[in-house]
Each structure stands twice: as structure tokens, then as C-alpha cells.
Amino acid sequence: MILVSITKKPLLFITTIACATFLVQCKTETKPVVKTITNKTILTAPEGFSVTEVAKDLGAVRHLTISKNGDIYANRSVLKDDKAIVLLKDNNKDGAIDEQQYFADMPGTGILATDDYLYASSNSGVFRYKLNSDHEVIDTNTPEKIVDGLIDMGMDNAKPFTIDDNDNLYVTIGSWNDACRDNDAKAGMMPCTILDSAGGIWKFKTDKLNQTFADGSQYATGLKNAVGITWNHNTNSLFATDHGRGGFHNFYPELYTQKQDAELPAETLYELKEGDNAGWPNTYYDPIKNKRMLAPEYGGDGEQTSEDGFINPIVAFPAHLGPNDLLFYTGDMFPEKYKNGAFVAFHNQSSALKKGYFVAFVPFKNGKPSGDWEIFLDNFAGFDLANLEGGELKHRPCGLAQGPDGAIYVCDDFGGSIFKVTY
């Protein structure tokens, strides 16, 4: 009996060690996560990103915002079925829209959901709706008026806006005159009286109702039409994209060729502080020379630079792309290179670049651009813009928003679609 006991115990010990080793090996083995990438849209995105068309046929959806509960709101510049604001709800959180609602009877562009309110703009002011504890609009019929009576001359009359951390409301008032040109005199207005009420960004308060233009203060001037505007909460500063003027060759063929007309001026991105002057209409920024030039309406000849102390852009994009929204990415879904960088929605095309209708990305580090910009989301047009025969335009990106999960949403005011981009 003693001999049998001695022979069994070593065998049991060896068996126990083998099993333990096997269990340890099983626990340390991890199966690679299989990532499913889906894109049934016509858009192209970088490797690893999925693109979904979450809604379509919504009309002229301009800017959009995502509330903390995931509801999507978009503002329309043209009423559809007599309503301006679109609300899309994914009630069961399966990624598909279950419910659509429409309200507001004033067409506009800007829209922003905060903790307590949904703010929206018409072409002459900004109003808001109170949200309940579930981040839903309580009463869609009676918005509160924040500011009204801002000038609306029909051209470049959108009133995009943003809000900082101290209840300050920043509203763009674009110019209705491309170069502040007096067509009778064939020269620039001296001085440009438009700058008294447009061509810049004005500051109001969100905690005061029924303000008028006179209640605001001019925060920055010399911006022809800053449709992309956002408050960067990391840098605690205002950023805006500005549309450049046109008509160089048409009005001054002796100074500018048709090629120069296609290449000038830059579309620009600024970081703005109070009192800044971005130089419109006296100057324009040349993206080829990388210099601020004196405008021909004010004595420039295409070679004369400006030395009047106007601020320079932090990024100069090719001409005529039409930057219509700006978003700093703060989510954790996308790769690290996108963290705190800027996405820009371009609403038009550059004949010189032979590209357009895309969303670009500008890398940032420590609050400043840290590398060349790149195309992030492309082919909204639906055809090759380098093809001289062209094609039928499908989409024009206009608005950008970030969801609570870090996904990016893009709306299109031509085809009426909203796209969701995930990683």
C-alpha cells in the first residue's frame, strides 16, 4: 500500500502542474478584435472609418448639433413643410433613426444644444428653447428671443453663432457686398460703412432676453462672411473660417488673369481675440505668396502688400472652397492624431485645385496648427471634379457636429442628407 501511494502522488502532482499551465496559457490568449467597417454611401473616408447616411431628403440643412441624449437637431435655411428645425431621434439606440419631428417657422443656419437650452438662429437673430432634464425641448411653440434686428440684406445673410463658458454669444454678420465696392465709382467705399453693422462678429449675452443690435459689441471686424464659427473650450478662444471675396479678373482684368482669379484669395481660418481686424475689404490673403495684399479697390495692383497691422490667418486654404463650418474634435473614438484638431466643411469647389465639396482636417498641437491640412471626407459631389464634362452634384457639406460617443456628423444642404462617421 505504501508503494502504491508513493507512485500516485507524483503522477497527481505532474497532472496538476500541466493543467495549471494549460489554464494560464488559455487565460493569456486573447482573440484579436474583429472591426467591422461599413460604408454604403458615395463618400470616401480614411482607412478604418465607417460612414452611414442616417437621414436624407431633409431639405437645406445648414448647421447641426447633437444633444447630450444623442438627439440630432439641424437648422434649415429654407422652410420645408413650413418648418425650419429638424429633430431626429434614435429611441432604441440601435443606430437607426426611429422618429422625426419638425418645428420653428424661421429659416436659418446656426443651431447649438447646451446643457439647458437649444439655441438656433434666423437670418436676423438668435432664439432658444428650454430643455428638460432628459435634454428634450419642452415647448417648441414659444422660443425665447435672445437677440433680433440684425441686418439682413439677402446676400450672405446667415447668422451662425457660438457660445463661450461665460454666457457670451458670438454672432457672425456677413457682408452683402463682396468687396465693399462702389460700382458707380468703380472703387472701394472710403470708408467702408458696411463695417458698422456687418463684415464681422458681434458679442451679446445669453442671459439677457430681447436684445437688439445696439446691445451688442463688435468683437472682431474685417471678416467678409465667417460662416464657420466656434468657441474652442481648450484654448478658451474664438475660431472662425472666413469666405474670401472674388471678382479680381472680372473687375480688374488689367491686373489679374483668369488663372489668378481662380487662385485668389485664400479661404481662411483665424483664431480671434477681441478687437482683431482680419483685413476685409481693404486687403486679401494670397495663399501662394503667403502674404496679406492690398485689395485693388483700395489701390492694390496684385503685388503691393499691406502693412496696416491686420491679423494673418493661422491656416490659408485654396480659393473659393467656401468653408461653412468648423469643429474641434474632443472625443475619444477617433485615433489620437485627431484629438483637438479642427474639421472644416467646405461647401464649394476650387477650379484651381480641381477638388471641392469635402470635409478637411487640420492637425493641432497645444492649440495651434501642427501640420498640413488634409482631406478627411470626400466625394460629396458624387463625381470627379477634375473631369471637364462634370456630372450631377449630389451633396454639399455644410454643418458639423460631434456626438456624445465621439462620432462626427455632417449635414448637406443640397441633397438634404446627414452622415455619421465612426471609427
Image: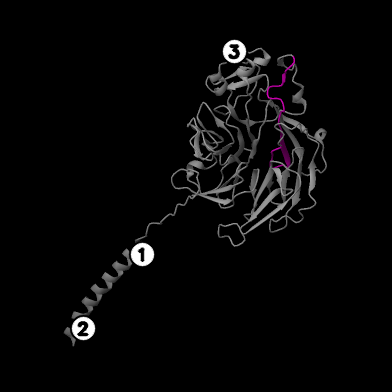
Can residue 378 be seen here?
Answer: no
Q: Residue at x 18, y 80 (%)?
A: 7
Q: Work out whether residue 290 or residue 321 is closer to the camera in this orientation and state it.
A: 321
Dot 3: element: loop
Name the image quarter holding residue 359: top right
Name the foreground residue: 277 vs 63. 63
Reading the image, the residue beneath label 2 is: 5
Residue 70 in picture, x, y percent from top left: 62, 54
Earlier-in-chain disc, 2 versus 1: 2
Q: Secondary structure at mark 2?
A: helix
Q: Earlier in the sequence, mark 1 or mark 3?
A: 1
44 displayed left or right of 237? left
Q: Amino acid at mark 2?
A: Ser
Q: Is residue 212 left or right of residue 199?
A: right
Name the residue carrying label 1: 27
Is 170 magenta? The answer is yes
With respect to residue 272, does 67 lie above or below? Answer: below
Task: Give the magenta-colored segment's residue range.
Answer: 159-184
Q: Is residue 344 above or below residue 21?
A: above
Q: CA distance from mark 2 to mark 1?
A: 33 Å
Circle 1 sits in a helix, a strand or a loop, which is it?
helix
Q: Are marks 1 and 3 in contact (CB under 8 Å)?
A: no
Q: Which mark is residue 417?
A: none
The label on residue 255 is 3
